[in-house]
């Protein structure tokens, strides 16, 4: 597999607003990963999952894999984000009334429409030649799912599905590990542990079954949770620039700090445990750059 030309690389860096030093990440880590996927690909439509905390570059990696595999292999690659399968705001509002108020906030296991995601993945895996399929999209700026007429379409057949999501492959904790709150949000808004128990139970049941459909898992490992907070703030600022005046879902720094506490427990657990189960681990440094790739399984 040949790498991108200089002009193609310039275009990719510009599209994703990446610094020039990211060229080395593409050459040393992204391209070898694309070659690895090509080497292990079977005739059927497979799902490659990309997991990693907020701001680790999941969508950037997913798009690079799509562009490179389509160009070099002639594949048709569908890229999906678990974020696009959040429950609607109305559905989360109802969940917050019936189960726990914290479930109004999107992100944690239990706030996704897994049934919709599974139907979408199955449809893509069996999409006939020439048939079009609409992929759901979620508008984070307005904190709600876009209407169906605004969903993008792909045309079959699909050779590879790349699914990215912050909690893909996350491992549930033992109940005793949930007893002590790890941040102010858990202490003040979930003092009896009901929310974290619900999230953990959903992760142990429906989400674990859902993760089993992923054929290969790539984990973008952040150095620590502080880095995640900084990167996510950068991501939010970019989102605000794109949203303009339509920015109901855009958060300031204080709101973001509160928002990230919803993810802190699982993020810390994943940084510790996912390297032991993921097929590929891309280790990131404080500057958001991949410094080492570890391939755990080849077959």
Image: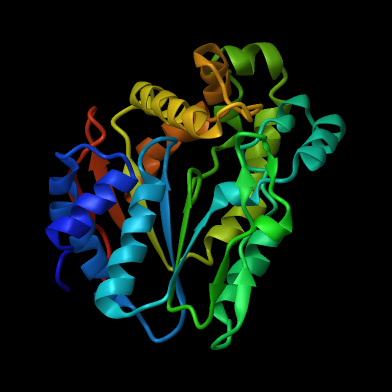
Give the residue at x 67% y 35%. 143
Number of dots carrying numbers: 0
Name the image quarter holding residue 27.
bottom left
Quadrant of the image for the C terminus? bottom left
Name the image quarter holding residue 41.
bottom left
Q: Camera-side residue: 137 or 25?
A: 137
Residue 278 seen in the current view: no
Residue 82 seen in the current view: yes
Give the residue at x 18% y 47%. 25
As displayed, is residue 85 above or below residue 270?
below
**Residue 55: percent from the left, percent from the top?**
40, 35
**Residue 267: percent from the left, percent from the top?**
45, 33
Q: Camera-side residue: 82 or 183?
A: 82
Q: Classify residue 100 as left or right of residue 26.
A: right
**Residue 263: percent from the left, percent from the top?**
53, 30
Q: Classify residue 216 as left or right of residue 118.
A: left
Quadrant of the image for the N terminus? bottom left
As displayed, is residue 65 above or below residue 90?
below
Q: Classify residue 36 as left or right of residue 89.
A: left
The colour scheme is rainbow
């Amino acid at each position: 597999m040949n790498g991108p030309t200089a002009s193609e690389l310039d275009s990719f860096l510009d599209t994703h607003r990446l610094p020039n030093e990211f060229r080395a990440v593409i050459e040393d880590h992204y391209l070898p990963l694309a070659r690895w996927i090509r080497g292990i690909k079977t005739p059927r439509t497979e799902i490659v999952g990309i997991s990693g905390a907020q701001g680790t570059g999941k969508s950037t990696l997913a798009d690079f894999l799509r562009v490179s595999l389509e160009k070099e292999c002639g594949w048709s690659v569908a890229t999906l984000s678990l974020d696009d399968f959040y429950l609607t705001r109305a559905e989360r509002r109802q969940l917050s009334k019936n189960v726990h108020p914290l479930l109004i906030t999107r992100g944690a296991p239990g706030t996704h429409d897994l049934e919709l995601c599974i139907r979408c993945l199955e449809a893509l895996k069996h999409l006939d030649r020439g048939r079009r399929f609409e992929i759901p999209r979620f508008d984070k700026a307005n904190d709600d799912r876009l209407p169906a007429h605004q969903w993008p379409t792909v045309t079959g057949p699909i050779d590879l599905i790349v699914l990215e999501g912050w909690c893909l492959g996350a491992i549930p904790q033992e109940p005793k590990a949930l007893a002590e709150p790890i941040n102010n949000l858990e202490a003040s808004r979930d003092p009896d542990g009901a929310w974290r128990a619900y999230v953990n139970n959903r992760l142990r049941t429906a989400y674990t079954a859902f993760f089993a459909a992923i054929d290969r898992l790539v984990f973008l490992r952040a150095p620590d949770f502080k880095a995640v907070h900084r990167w996510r703030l950068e991501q939010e600022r970019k989102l605000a620039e794109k949203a303009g005046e339509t920015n109901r879902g855009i958060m300031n720094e204080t709101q973001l700090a509160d928002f990230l506490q919803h993810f802190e427990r699982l993020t810390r657990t994943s940084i510790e445990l996912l390297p032991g189960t993921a097929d590929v681990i891309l280790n990131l440094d404080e500057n958001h750059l991949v410094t080492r790739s570890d391939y755990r399984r080849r077959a």
